[in-house]
Every structure is written in structure tokens, then in C-alpha cells.
Amino acid sequence: MKTYIFLFFLSVFIFTAGGHHYRNDGYALYLTTKSISKGHFYIPELPNYSVAGKNGKFYSIYEIGYPLAGVPLLLLG
């Protein structure tokens, strides 16, 4: 029963999602997810959403959990 409840709410979430990003932080999280799926962690420079590393590349200011959870969904298409 718990599985059916979970699948119901998951389907409601998926079918009502906007399909695009409403704010720049969503875009930064998307770019981080995309870069993790390619095997690296740096992203393009985004003011207020990235920080420069010692190697001159830019990294997201967000934690790794949300982008890491999104990698399988990104790879599914």
C-alpha cells in the first residue's frame, strides 16, 4: 500500500511539473547535475551561484545531494 501511495504522489508531481527552471538556482543545479553526469564537477561561471576554485574553474555553491539524485533522471532523458 505504501508503494502505491508513493507512486501516486510521484506521478502527480511529475505530471504537474513545469518542465523548465523558474529561477537561476534551478539552472545552477541543472548545470551541476549535467556536469556530474559527464564526470566532472565544474560549471560555467554564474554570478551569485558559483565560486572559483584554485584551478580557475567554477563550482556550484550548492550541496551535492540534489544534483546527485538528479543524475539518473538526466541520463534517462
Image: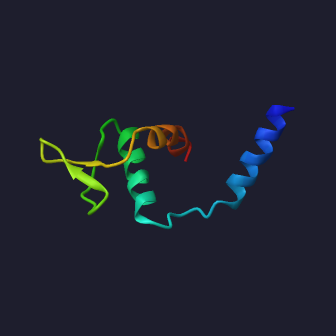
Q: Is residue 53 left or right of residue 63?
A: left
Q: How many marks?
A: 0
Quadrant hosting residue 49:
bottom left
Between residues 63 and 20, which one lies in front from this camera angle? 63
Q: Quadrant of the N terminus?
A: top right
Residue sitting at the far bottom: 22
Q: Residue at x 40, y 64 (%)?
A: 24
Q: Residue at x 23, y 51 (%)?
A: 51
Chosen colour scheme: rainbow
Horizontal and vertical percent position of residue 25: 41, 59
Q: Is residue 8 left or right of residue 56?
A: right
Q: Is residue 56 left or right of residue 75?
A: left
Horizontal and vertical percent position of residue 7: 77, 41
Q: Residue at x 75, y 53 (%)?
A: 12
Horizontal and vertical percent position of residue 63: 39, 42
Q: Residue at x 70, y 53 (%)?
A: 13
